Amino acid sequence: MLKQVINSTEGGARIKGTIQLSLKDSIKKYCQKPIDKSIIKPLLTPADDADELIEKVIPLLKNDIDDLNDIITNSRKGIAISHGIKTLISRHEYTKLLPKAKRILFDKINKKASEEAKGNPMIITRLFFERAIKKLTKCRLKTIMVMNEKNFIYSEAAHMSTIKNPLVNVAVYGASRQIQTRGLKVDASINHFLMNQKDAIIRTQRNIIILKAAYTAGKSLKKSYKETLKLLTKYNKTKDNSLLASNKIEPINLDDAEEYFKAKNWAHPLLDADKYITHIDNTMPTPVPKKYHKALKIYEKALKMKNDAIKEAKESETKYHDKMNKLLEYNKLLKEAKEIGRVDKDFDKALKLMNQATKLVPDDPEALWGLATALHHAGKIKESIAKYKELIEKFPDNVTFKFEYGQVLLRHNELQEGLKIIGEVMEVTDEFDNFLTRIGDIYLKGDLVKEALVAYNSYLEKFPFDFEAWNKKGQCLDKLGKKALAQKAYNKALEIKPK
């Protein structure tokens, strides 16, 4: 292998061909060289199409700020409701809320909702609360159910907004991981919640932790986004390039040099020592500060470490010269193939380059993946299917390869097998949920209207502002004779895009 791949996801997968290492250990072992920002600054000039890019970014930032406002508002409301629920169910009179008759009733309502929603958990929960609350008279149980319904609405709205912002999603994921280690994972059924006071309190606390993570991340990001938006809006009016370059002077710190040296990092101490020595030499203070001699020692030590590193790198270069040349040629072929395929659409030439690359480095997946993709775009579907099978056999844990394989099967009119493969992938990851609308289109074209409706409903749960999906949902409902519901879907599409 000419490349080493570190798997620091810290998840359950043991990916073939990778080295398993925690993120902390990966950073400690490999991320040892700081960036000298003073060297980078002269390079930080606006791109040739900077004005055009900024024009596009400004509305995107505004949309992101709107999404962050939704996260902040819904998280705050969800936290407030959750605290209210926790306070109520902690009282003695709330220890036994669910008599047997109500438990049987709730099970029936939940079962019927599940059948109608075809297993979609969001729709099931919504239908359950709506119908269960109607069956209850004024009592403590109804109060808790109403509060839980509101909590579900706000929490789900916050969750849907976090999906749009990867940074907030990471914060929520971190909170979820924290929950796994704090004994906060309990039975999720509403009956269990109402019958087990201890677990109900734990579940509520779990929800508070996740919502707080979303709220905190949303608030923090909103501040940064607003500052960026203000800066870019000002630049858009003035075209003052200095607004896009940082004038912040990096502070000099010699006290942390030994910590860097312990980590075998000489670059940061060398830069700081050099800056301090240069400053003293230029100003020539009398007497010379004691810190000057400290800076000299740090500089000498860092310089020796630098020279040793250069020597080691040169020796390594000599030792692995042939392998490095092969790797450079491999990367060059990949780059050329991608460029020719993307820009010139010359897939035959791209295929030749990809074949050359795979012969150079047969164990690397990128060239084989590129070859499978190029065959697909060149219309050589059978050959593409064979390459994707080879990829999946070598890298069975890679969901992207499997998902693309399913798409190629669809193009080859192997609809049943293609949808099956794509379905298997979508069961283990939500990375490709935007493809649900394409699945709906396939079913609709094949006159499998009920199946198409399920796909569109699932898609709209994640992407509720896609007017085209609402329109197609309306078409499905029309075909099923549900005219009133179809009209509601069409109205929703018009509400999103009136024109």
Image (cartoon, helix red, strand yellow):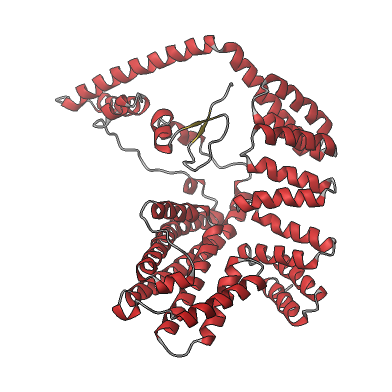
Q: For this view, does 148 lie left or right of residue 498?
A: left
**So how many labels did they put on this image?**
0
Specify whether residue 228 is in view: no
Q: Position of residue 16 (x, y in %)?
A: 58, 32
Residue in the picture at 71% in, 72% down: 493
Closest to the observer, 141 or 232: 141
Q: What residue is rendered at 71% in x and 30% in y? A: 368
Q: Position of residue 115 (x, y in %)?
A: 65, 71
Q: Which residue is the extreme one toward the left?
A: 287
Residue 189 position in % (x across, y down): 49, 68
In terms of depth relative to the viewer, which is nearer, 306 or 453? 453
Q: Is residue 138 above or below residue 269?
A: below
User: Can I make out residue 418 in this image?
Assistant: yes
Residue 126 % position (x, y)? 57, 74
- Image quadrant in which you'd find residue 306: top left
> Which quadrant holds residue 438?
bottom right
Which is nearer the eye, 24 or 238? 24
Q: Quadrant of the N terminus?
A: top right
In the picture shown, does residue 97 fall above or below 375? Answer: below
Classify 192 as above or below 183: below
Could you tell me which residue is drawn at 36 percent across and 25 percent down?
265
Q: In this picture, is 441 found above or below 131? A: above
> For the C terminus, which image quadrant?
bottom right
In this rendered view, identify the residue nearer to me: 198 or 434: 198
Instruction: Kindly give the residue lying farthest to the bottom in the view shown.
Output: 138
